[in-house]
Amino acid sequence: MSWIPCDADLGSHPKLWRMSHSLEISRPSAVGHILLLWHWCAKHAKDGDITECCADQIAFAMMWEGDSQVLLKTLIECRLLDRENGRLTVHNWEKHAGARLRCLGADAARKRAARQRAVNEEFAR
């Protein structure tokens, strides 16, 4: 089961308030949509770079049922997403998930190496 850390203050963060106010949704809904985006990125865009995603794909990842263009515009205006140098990234992705995902990657590599050693030992017998 994969997970990423979430600050306990997320629901009261000013960016989430601006998002909820702009999209006319509750703060708990805003938190849920952002967490869905982060979880989607943890699986499909591990570096937080979603440049290749269109607004509809981002809305799909967030289970957003409203206008995807309005959602994207709001996320950028609230600085939950950064658009710089032709790239679209999750703001502070490294802070949100970087260490956790590096740890998962190192653990997966360690397990692969252990499986390969076991196979090599079996063939050596």
Image (spheres, rainbow, N blue to C red):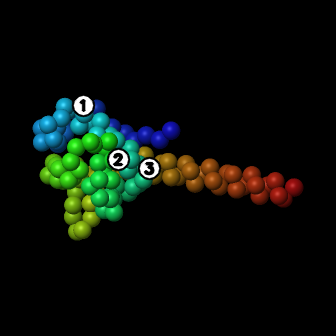
Real-space Cα distance between discs 3 and 1? 23 Å
Q: Who comes first in sequence, dot 3 or dot 1?
A: 1
Give the label, 2 or 3, closer to the camera: 2
Q: Secondary structure at mark 1?
A: helix
Q: Dot 3: within a 10 Å radius of its alpha carbon, few (fewer than 14), some, or many (20 or more) residues? A: few
Judging depth in this view, the residue of 75 and 82 nearest the camera is 75
- Asked if residue 120 lies left or right of residue 25, the reply is right
Q: Position of residue 22 (x, y in %)?
A: 12, 42
Residue type, label 2: Ala
Three-letter amino acid code of the residue under disc 3: Lys
Q: Amino acid at mark 1?
A: Pro
Q: Decide: is 72 above or below 16.
A: below
Residue placed under numbered mark 3 in the picture: 43
Give the CA separation, mark 2 to mark 3.
11 Å
Rounded to the nearest angstrom, the CA distance separating label 2 from label 1 is 17 Å
Label 1, on which residue?
A: 28
- Ranked by sequence position, the earlier of labels 2 and 1 is 1
Q: Position of residue 110 (x, y in %)?
A: 60, 52
Give the residue number, with chain letter if any, for mark 2.
Answer: 61
**Which residue is pictured at 23% across the width and 68% down the height?**
85
In the rendering, at what x and y percent does residue 93 appear? 31, 51
Left or right: 25, with 114 as reference point = left
Identity of the residue drawn at 28% across and 40% down: 33
Categorize mark 1 by other alpha carbons within 10 Å: few (<14), some (14-19), many (20+): some
